[in-house]
Amino acid sequence: MKIISVYIEQFGIFSKQSFTFNEGLNEFTRKNGWGKSTLCAFIKAMFFGMKYTTGNEFTDRKKYLSFSKGPVGGNLVFEAKGKTYRIERFFGEKPKGDLFRILDGNTLVETEDFSENLGEELFGLDMDSFERSVFISGNPADKKNPELTSSITSHLNGLLEDSGDMTSFDRVIKGIEKEISSLKSQRGSSANKTIDRLEGEIKKLEKELTEVLENENIRKEKEHKLFQLENEITDFGKEILTLQDSLLENQKRKKNGKSNLGFFILSVAFLLVFAFGCYASLVWIKNAKIIAVLAMLPVLSIANFFLLAVQKKHSKKQIEKLPSTSELMGKIRELQNKKDALIIEKTGLVKEIEFLERSIDKADVISHELSVKKEELETALNRLKILNLTKESLGRAKENLESNYTQDLKNCFLRYMSLFEKEQFFSMDAKMNLLVEREGQFWDQRYFSEGYKDLTGFCARLALAQCLFKMEKPFLILDDTFVNLDKEKLEKAERVVAAIAKNTQVIYFKAR
C-alpha cells in the first residue's frame, strides 16, 4: 500500500500545490512553519474525512476552513491490493456540504470498491486508531500514545469481518457503567441515584411508621385519660345535683318556719278571742255543760300555745344548723367551674384522639408503600449485582481475547527496542502500557524522559503496525517523531526507519 500523489486545491497554507511520493523512504526536511503538519492533516482528511462537532472543540475542520479561501480539499492517488485509486474530497462547514468521489486510477470511472468511509475500510481502523498506529507524530498537539482501542483490538483478533464486535463491547461496557452509575453513587459523590434514593425513602417511611405505632400507644393513654375525665365530670354533676337539692330543702324549711310563726300568732289571737267569749258566756249563759266545755277550751289553747312555742324553738335550731343559701350557691358555682374546666379539657382531648386516629389510619398505607419500596430496592440491588458480575465477566473475556496477541506484540516491541538499548529495562503490559524497570519494580511512562517517551512510543507503534498488518503493509507517516532524541539515538532511529522503508513506504517529515 502506498501513496502516489497528492494535489491540494486549498487547505491551510497550501493552495494549488502538488506532491509526489516514491516507494520506500520519502523524506521532507523543512523548516518549522513550512506546513509539515498541514500536509499530514490533509492526507488523514483524504482517507477519513474531517470531524465535525457543534461544541467548542477546535477540530481540523474548524482550523483549516478558517484559514482557507475557496473550496477546501483536493485529491490523493494511492495504490492498494494491486489497484490504483483516486480520492477526491472537498469540505464544507458541515458534513452535508462535503463532496466525495473515488475513481479507478486507470479508467477514472467511479468505483464502488470503497465508500466515503474509505479509511476504516482500507486500514480496518478508525481515525483515532490510525493516529495511534501508522501515523506517528511528535507534534504535542497531535501526539497520541499507542493504545489498544476497540478498532485495533478487533484487527489484532482477526475480527475485521465483524469489526463492530469490539466497538460493541466498549459500547456495552459504557452502557453497563452508565447503568451502574444511575443505580448507585460512587464514593465521594452526592448524586441522588436510584439505590441511594430508595434507601433514603425507606428510612423516612420506617421513621413515619415508628411514629404512627408510637401514636397508637399515645392514643390509648389519651382514651384512658378521657374515661377518667368523663367519670370526674359525672361525679361533679352528681355533687352539684345534691347541693341543689339541699338548697331547695333549706328554702323549704325556712318557709315552713315562717308558716308556724303565723299559726302561733293566729293561736294567740284565737285564745284572746276565746277568753273574751268565755267572759261573755259567764255573764250571759247559764247552762252548766256549755260552761264546762267552754272552761276546757282555755286549757287546750294554752297547751297548743306551749306546743307551738316548743316547735318553733326546735325549728329555729334546725334552720340555724343548715348551710346558708349563699354558702350553698358558692359551693355549686365552685363545682360547676371545675366541671366546665373538665369539659373543656375533654373537648381538647377528644380532638387530640381524633388527630391520632387519623394518623394511625395511615399505618396501612405507609406499610404498603414501605413494602413496595423495599421490593424496588431489592430489585435494584440485584440488578446492580448482575451488572457488576456482567462487567467483570466481560472484562475477563476481553483480557482472555487480548492475551491471544499481547505476547507477540510485546516481543515485537522488545525486538525494536533492542536496536536502541542493549540492556532491556523496558516492557509492555497486556494493555500496551509501556513500563521501565528500576530498582526491582516497574514504573509507567510518567517517569520516562521525553526522549525515552518518544523512543518507546516509536518502537511500540512499529510493533503495533507489524502485528496489525500481516499481509499488505500500509505506509507509515512520521511527523517530527524524533525531536526529543539525542544525536546517538537519532542516528539509530533513522537507520531503523531506513531499514523499514525497504519493505514499507515511509513518509518522514522532520525539521531542518
Image (cartoon, rainbow, N blue to C red):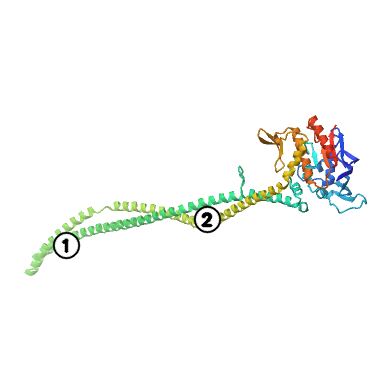
Of residues 231 and 13, the one drawn nearer to the viewer in this rendering: 13
Q: Measuring from the top left, give residue 506's x and y in whole percent.
A: 85, 40
Q: Secondary structure at mark 1?
A: helix
Q: Is residue 65 visible?
A: no
Q: Measuring from the top left, give residue 387's x and y in whole percent.
A: 63, 51
Q: Measuring from the top left, give residue 36's x and y in whole percent.
A: 85, 37
Of residues 1 and 76, the one drawn nearer to the viewer in this rendering: 1
Q: Is residue 399 above or below residue 138?
A: below
**Three-letter residue code for mark 1:** Phe
Q: Which mark is residue 270?
A: 1
Q: Secondary structure at mark 2?
A: helix
Residue 273 vs residue 443: left or right? left
Mark 2 crowdedness (10 Å alpha carbons): few <14, some 14-19, many ≥20:
some
Which corner quadrant of the image does residue 494 belong to?
A: top right
Mark 1 crowdedness (10 Å alpha carbons): few <14, some 14-19, many ≥20:
few
Residue 364 vs residue 52: left or right? left
Quadrant the C terminus occupies? top right
Q: Which mark is residue 402?
A: none
Q: Which label lies toward us, 1 or 2?
A: 2
Q: Is residue 221 visible?
A: yes
* Residue tagged 2: 366
Of residues 189 and 227, the one drawn nearer to the viewer in this rendering: 189
Q: Is residue 510 above or below residue 101?
A: above
Q: Which badge, 1 or 2, is on the more N-terminal residue?
A: 1
Q: Measuring from the top left, give residue 83's x and y in whole percent.
A: 89, 50
